[in-house]
Image: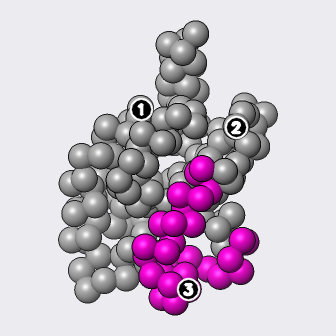
């Protein structure tokens, strides 16, 4: 979270002529609840079930850029499932950048804790993120630069599959 997934995903989809979907927005539309409301009323485990259902059957198989929540890949087996769906790109930034970028947004249930900075550092310590796919830093880079990098990574992955 806080690495620019939505803005970058929208730009990437537009440049590639692909559809863009944000898993959080799809889940909100399907449930009629905002993500913080789902966490409060149904809990994180239920939200993770919604995410898994979306990944398993909630989007087109081709020509689609999908932004997912930051906690999705941490779920057991999810990293492998994501790789069967397409090219996985993990965007990341420093803990300090993420803390600054998310500090004014209270709609982040994973950071609605006593010490959000500690929680960000804890999440960044998850090795699964760096093993989930091509990793691209958003630190001090423009959206244009990041999208260009993603497009190169995507092309390399597609060539490997052929």
Q: Position of residue 93 (x, y in %)?
A: 35, 50
Q: Residue at the spot x=38%, y=39% of the render?
A: 132
Q: Quadrant of the C terminus?
A: top right
Q: Residue at the spot x=43%, y=73% of the render?
A: 45
Range of residues picked out in magenta: 29-56
Q: Count residues near mark 1 (Cα–Cα under 10 Å), then give few for <14, some for 14-19, many for 20+.
A: some
In the picture of the structure, the residue carrying the numbered disc 2 is: 61
- Number of the label disc, if any, that sits on residue 134: 1
The residue closer to the viewer here, 60 or 25, is 60
Residue 109, quarter of picture? bottom left
User: In the rendered image, is residue 139 in sight?
Assistant: no
Q: Residue at the spot x=35%, y=53% of the render?
A: 76
Residue 141, quarter of picture? top left
Cα separation, mark 3 vs mark 2, equals 29 Å
Question: Dots 3 and 2: beta carbons under 8 Å?
Answer: no
Image position of 23 (left or right of 107): right
Of badges 1 and 2, the one in the foreground is 2
Q: Position of residue 102 (x, y in %)?
A: 42, 69
In the picture of the structure, the residue carrying the numbered disc 3 is: 37
Q: Residue at the spot x=68%, y=77% of the render?
A: 31
Secondary structure beneath dot 1 equals strand
The residue closer to the viewer here, 125 or 92, is 125
Q: Look at the image and say whether residue 38 sits in the magenta stretch.
A: yes
Query: Is 61 above or below relative to 108?
Result: above
Q: Count residues near mark 2 (Cα–Cα under 10 Å), then give few for <14, some for 14-19, many for 20+.
A: few
Q: Look at the image and say whether residue 24 sits in the magenta stretch.
A: no
Secondary structure beneath dot 2 equals loop
Q: Count residues near mark 3 (Cα–Cα under 10 Å), then give few for <14, some for 14-19, many for 20+.
A: some
Residue 144, quarter of picture? top right
Of badges 1 and 3, the one in the foreground is 3
Image position of 38 (left or right of 132): right
């Amino acid at each position: 979270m806080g690495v620019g997934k939505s803005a970058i995903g929208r730009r990437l989809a537009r440049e590639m002529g692909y559809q863009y979907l944000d898993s959080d927005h799809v889940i909100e539309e399907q449930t009629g609840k905002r993500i913080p409301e789902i966490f409060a009323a149904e809990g994180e485990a239920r939200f993770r079930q919604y995410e898994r259902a979306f990944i398993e059957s909630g989007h087109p198989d081709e020509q689609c850029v999908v932004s997912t929540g930051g906690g999705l890949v941490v779920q057991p087996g999810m990293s492998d499932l994501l790789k069967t769906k397409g090219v996985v790109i993990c965007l990341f930034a420093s803990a300090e950048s993420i803390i600054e970028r998310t500090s004014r947004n209270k709609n982040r249930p994973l950071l609605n804790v006593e010490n959000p900075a500690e929680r960000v550092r804890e999440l960044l310590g998850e090795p699964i993120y760096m093993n989930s796919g091509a990793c691209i830093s958003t630190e001090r880079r423009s959206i244009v630069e990041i999208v260009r990098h993603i497009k190169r990574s995507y092309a390399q992955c597609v060539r490997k599959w052929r």
